[in-house]
Amino acid sequence: MVHQVVSSYNRLGIAAIETGGKGGRRRQYVTWEEEQAFLAPFFTRAEHGEIATAGEIKRAFEAQVGHEVHKSTISRLLQRHGWRKPMPRPVHPQASAEVQEQFKKTSQPALRLPSRPVQQRTHDPS
């Protein structure tokens, strides 16, 4: 390896040993700035309370790059830009407390197994 590096340096000069280095996004479809510009309309819609699905974002991304991409590509893209998986709502928006209370009053009681009898302990002072 050392002989190859010396030979490359002798032939090409300093450009032979100045490389891009390790790491980086070498197989990217678009740059970071292009990804931000692509996601900007979805961020705007999300700020207004509209829902943007990963499938919708995937179709728009495929239209931009001109071919199909794997769904993990979109997952990683959203993760890079700080999107997270949404959590389920604690309460359904159309839920009614009155209807739930009425259901609790009129529904059949759940099958309850008899509990074990509690044994009384006698206190032995000795």
Image: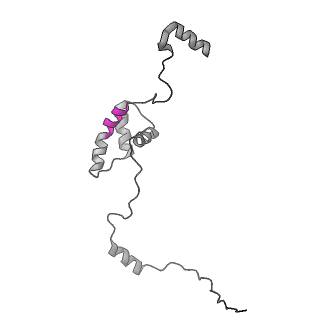
Which residue is drawn at the image coordinates 36% and 47% (left, top)?
53
Could you tell whether 17 is left or right of 120 in the image?
left
Which quarter of the rendering shows the N terminus?
Answer: top right
Write down the quadrant of residue 58 in the picture.
Answer: top left
Magenta highlight on residue 95: no
Write down the quadrant of residue 33 in the picture.
Answer: top left
Which residue is drawn at the image coordinates 61% and 12% (left, top)?
3
Which color scheme does this rendered protein use?
one colour
- Nearer to us in this view, 118 or 107: 118
Q: Main secondary structure of the magenta part?
A: loop
- Residue most extreme to the top: 11
Which quarter of the rendering shows the C terminus?
Answer: bottom right
- Nearer to us in this view, 116 or 84: 84
Q: Which residues are magenta?
A: 17-39
Write down the quadrant of residue 114 in the picture.
Answer: bottom right
Magenta highlight on residue 25: yes
